[in-house]
Each structure stands twice: as C-alpha cells, then as structure tokens.
Amino acid sequence: MTKSLYATFDGHVFTPEENINLLPNRRYLISIETPPSQKPGQEGKVLQRIAARAKDLGISDLAAQHDHYLYGTEKQ
C-alpha cells in the first residue's frame, strides 16, 4: 500500500496534517520529498527572471535567420 500525505516536522517528530489510518507500534517506510515552494500566481515572477537574463545581441533579424546565426547556414 502506498499513501501520500503532508506532514510537518517539528525537529523531533513528523505530525500528519490529516488523519491517517495506520496501525500503532508498526514499522513503516517513509520517503521524504519537499513539495514545490511555488505558490499560485508566481508564474509571472518566473517569466520576469527569464526576461531579465535576455540580452540584446544587436541582431535585428535573429528570429528570421536563426539557422544562419546558430549553424552558419546561408541567409534565406
């Protein structure tokens, strides 16, 4: 049986955020995974970070002639 649930770690024990139906005094294998920290509405921030990395290469026809600049083919 596999069950996924959220739990909070207080430094000593994990406390499930919902009721779980497990037998007491029984050994269980627990896998730890940190959930993504991205909150709804942060998509714009990601795009802003990508846009901030963009550089002006001074090439006005880069989109139309990308094969020429990337692979060295003749301009179309």
Image (tube, rainbow, N blue to C red):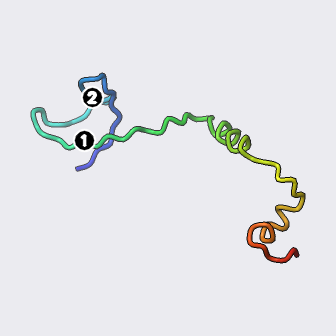
Label 2 to label 1: alpha-carbon separation: 10 Å
Classify residue 46 as left or right of residue 31: right
Where is mark 1, residue-wise?
A: 30
| Residue type for callout 2 | Phe
In the rendered image, residue 10, in percent from the top left (x then y), is placed at 30, 22
Q: Residue extending furthest left? A: 25
Q: Image quadrant of residue 19? A: top left
Where is mark 2, residue-wise?
A: 14
Quadrant of the snapshot with the C terminus: bottom right
Q: Secondary structure at mark 1?
A: loop
The residue sitting at 87% across, 57% down in the picture is 59
The residue sitting at 32% across, 40% down in the picture is 32
In the rendered image, residue 15, in percent from the top left (x then y), is placed at 28, 26
The residue sitting at 29% across, 30% down in the picture is 16
Q: How many marks?
A: 2
Classify residue 6 as left or right of residue 27: right
